[in-house]
Image (cartoon, rainbow, N blue to C red):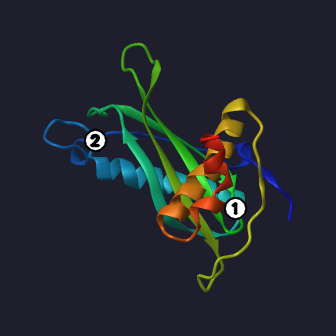
Amino acid sequence: MESRTAFQSKTVMTDLVLPSETNPLNNLFGGELLARMDRAASIAARRHSRRIVVTAAVNHVAFNRSIPLGSVVTIEAKVSRAFSTSMEVYLDVWIEDRESGECIKANEAIYTFVAVDETGRPVKIPELVAESALEIKRFDAALRRKQLSLVVAGKMKPNDATELKALFL
């Protein structure tokens, strides 16, 4: 199976915030943003694996900045690391300033997807090759996040979490 780069999974979705998608403060509902991010992340995961993918976890979401009514929102998603059958997808959410056109980072998230066959059974996926400095940073961090998740779930012994232990040596 030939490895793929993070860039090959890159997915960019741009949309407008409409009145029906906002709360009483005229900001985008968090759930609406989560749905948009899930769609972008699933496309990125599918591009990497070339398989059916299912959301396994929403590992992290940071709602750092509200997104006002009428905003142009761009979601960028890329696979940050591929494991045996699962992959981590890192998302950056940008809003475009109405007057200057400058893009401001509003939010970010990390999702995990699993590639499956037509019966829903997990299938092997290609390795990911990180190229840019940011991709390499996210690639390395993904293994620490996975180990932490496995330790918390009781699926890995803390002593076996080598990447986590290395942080404290």
Residue type (three-letter) at the residue carrying disc 1? Phe
Q: Position of residue 42 (x, y in %)?
A: 55, 59
Indicate the secondary structure of the residue bearing disc 2.
loop
Circle 2: is it few (<14), some (14-19), or many (20+) Cα within 10 Å?
many
Front residue of this view, candidates 33 and 110: 110
Question: Measured from the top left, where is residue 36 in percent x and y?
Answer: 42, 51
- Which element is circle 1 on? loop
Looking at this view, name the residue that lies furthest to the right.
2
Separation of disc 2 and disc 1 at Cα? 33 Å
- The residue indicated by pointer 1 is 83
Tag of residue 28: 2
Farthest bottom residue? 119
Looking at the image, residue 71 lies above or below residue 23: above
Which circle marks residue 22 in the picture?
none
The location of residue 49, given as percent across then percent down, is 70, 63
Q: Quadrant of residue 101?
A: top left
Q: Residue at x 44, y 49 (%)?
A: 60
Residue extending farthest to the left is: 24
User: Where is residue 117, by image quadrant?
Assistant: bottom right
Position of the C terminus by quadrant: top right
Residue drawn at 49 percent across, 56 percent down: 39
- Residue 142 visible here: no
> Of discs 2 and 1, which sits in the foreground?
1
Name which of mark 2 and mark 1 comes first in the sequence: 2
Q: Is residue 62 above or below residue 60?
A: above
